[in-house]
Image (spheres, rainbow, N blue to C red):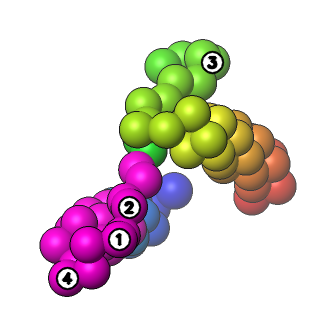
Amino acid sequence: MNKNMEHGAIIMGLILIITGIFLLLIGLFSNSKNVRVEYGVGGFIGPIPFGFANTKTMLYFTIALSIFFFLLFLLLRHTL
């Protein structure tokens, strides 16, 4: 991978993280009192997936999404 592609991947990752934080804050500070914000954070330490969330459903969703993206990473790594 050349320097331009590495730089682009870093910028894209930062944009995704900032967008996620922004959307979470919009939901948190919305004016409606009936809004319930659910959040989850997930990732991998080695081959082991982990996740933190405020509800059990969101935790399962976060871990499933982490596993999906890990498998997508493996697939794209072997094809490129």
Of residues 11 and 7, which is closer to you in this image?
Answer: 11
Nearer to us of marks 4 and 1 is 1
**Looking at the image, which residue is at 65% across and 36% down?**
60
> With respect to residue 8, does 17 lie above or below?
above
Q: Nearer the viewer, mark 2 or mark 1?
A: 1
Which numbered disc flags the more N-terminal residue, 4 or 3?
4
Along the horizontal axis of the image, is 1 left or right of 80? left
Q: Nearer the viewer, residue 7 or 60?
A: 60
Q: Secondary structure at mark 4?
A: loop
| Callout 1: SS | loop
Q: Which residue is mark 4?
A: 31
Q: Residue at x 35, y 71 (%)?
A: 34
Of all residues, the one furthest to the front in this rendering is 34
Question: Magenta stretch containing residue 19, yes or no?
Answer: yes
**What are the residue bounds of the magenta stretch?**
15-39
| Circles 3 and 2 in contact, beta carbons < 8 Å | no
Image spot of residue 31 (x, y percent) = 19, 82
Q: Which mark is residue 34?
A: 1
Mark before the other along the chain sequence, 3 or 2: 2
**Upstream in the sequence, badge 2 or badge 4?**
4
Residue 2 found in image quarter: bottom left
The span from disc 4 to disc 1 (Cα, nearest Å) is 9 Å
How far is the residue under mark 4 from the one under mark 3? 41 Å
The disc, 3 or 1, on the residue closer to the chain's N-terminal end is 1
Tell me which amino acid carries mark 1: Asn
Label 3 near label 4: C-beta < 8 Å?
Answer: no
Distance (Cα) linking label 3 and label 1:
39 Å
Q: Which mark is residue 47?
A: 3
Residue tagged by mark 2? 36
Do the CB atoms of the residues marked 2 and 1 lie less than 8 Å apart?
A: yes
Q: How far across and how far down the image is residue 45, in percent?
A: 48, 19
